[in-house]
């Protein structure tokens, strides 16, 4: 991954944290932590939201670790990270973060697909937050997941999607299911 792309993804992750924050998902849950949520359930729900987003797009697209653009680097599998990023809490809640490149977008259509995704999320009634520039958007679902869409600004093939789960207890970490390197667009039902 190029230094600039890595920086852009780091800024996106920080922005999503500021815009949504782990503690934002309260829904009656103690301290913003969903005590019934597990890492596996958080991953499964994140994949579900990514598949819903893909299904809203024309055929031919998928999500991949590998971008269409040769100037961008591969993304790594999703991770679990502490919800408190101050490095002052030794044991606390965690969340799942998953990132993919959107691949298969026809040349010259990145902006159109960006707008299609944003419109789909708005049509679902998800809370939409726009950045200070028009190259990223964050949607928050009713159950507290955040999905970020970013255009890395490297021309064709530079759209990415990232999901951020609500916080779950440290004891709920653990999964044996590897993250798929590609998520195909499901057929519309």
Image: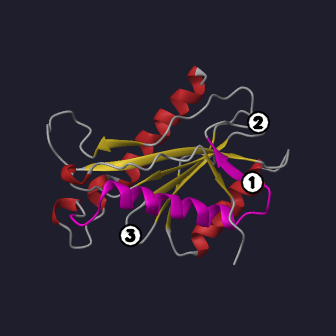
Give the residues in magenta: 35-64
The Cα–Cα distance between marks 2 and 1, rounded to whole angstroms, is 17 Å
Q: Is residue 29 magenta?
A: no
Image quadrant containing the N terminus: top right
Q: Residue 61 shows which numbered tag?
A: 1
Question: Horizontal and vertical percent for residue 151?
Answer: 65, 43
Between circles 2 and 1, the one closer to the viewer is: 1
Q: Secondary structure at mark 3?
A: loop
Q: Is residue 37 magenta?
A: yes
Q: Earlier in the sequence, mark 2 or mark 1?
A: 1
The Cα–Cα distance between marks 2 and 3, rounded to whole angstroms, is 34 Å
Question: Horizontal and vertical percent for residue 3?
Answer: 56, 21
User: Marks 2 and 1: CB-CB under 8 Å?
Assistant: no
Question: Horizontal and vertical percent for residue 97?
Answer: 42, 46
> Quick one: which residue is furthest to the right in this view?
107
User: Is residue 96 left or right of 89 when viewed as pictured?
Assistant: right
Residue holding disc 2: 155
Q: Secondary structure at mark 2?
A: loop
């Amino acid at each position: 991954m190029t230094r600039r792309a890595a920086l852009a993804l780091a800024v996106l992750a920080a922005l999503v944290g500021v815009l949504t924050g782990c503690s934002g998902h309260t829904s009656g849950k103690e301290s913003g932590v969903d005590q019934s949520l597990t890492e596996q359930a958080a991953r499964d729900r994140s994949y579900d939201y990514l598949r819903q987003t893909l299904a809203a797009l024309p055929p031919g697209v998928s999500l991949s670790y590998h971008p269409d653009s040769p100037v961008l680097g591969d993304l790594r599998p999703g991770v679990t990270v502490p919800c408190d990023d101050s490095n002052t809490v030794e044991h606390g809640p965690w969340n799942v973060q998953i990132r993919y490149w959107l691949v298969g977008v026809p040349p010259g259509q990145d902006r159109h697909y960006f707008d299609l995704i944003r419109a789909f999320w708005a049509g679902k009634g998800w809370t939409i937050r726009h950045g200070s520039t028009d190259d990223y958007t964050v949607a928050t679902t009713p159950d507290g997941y955040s999905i970020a869409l970013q255009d890395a600004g490297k021309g064709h093939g530079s759209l990415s999607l990232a999901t951020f789960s609500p916080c779950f207890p440290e004891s709920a970490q653990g999964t044996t299911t590897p993250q798929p390197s590609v998520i195909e667009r499901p057929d519309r039902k």
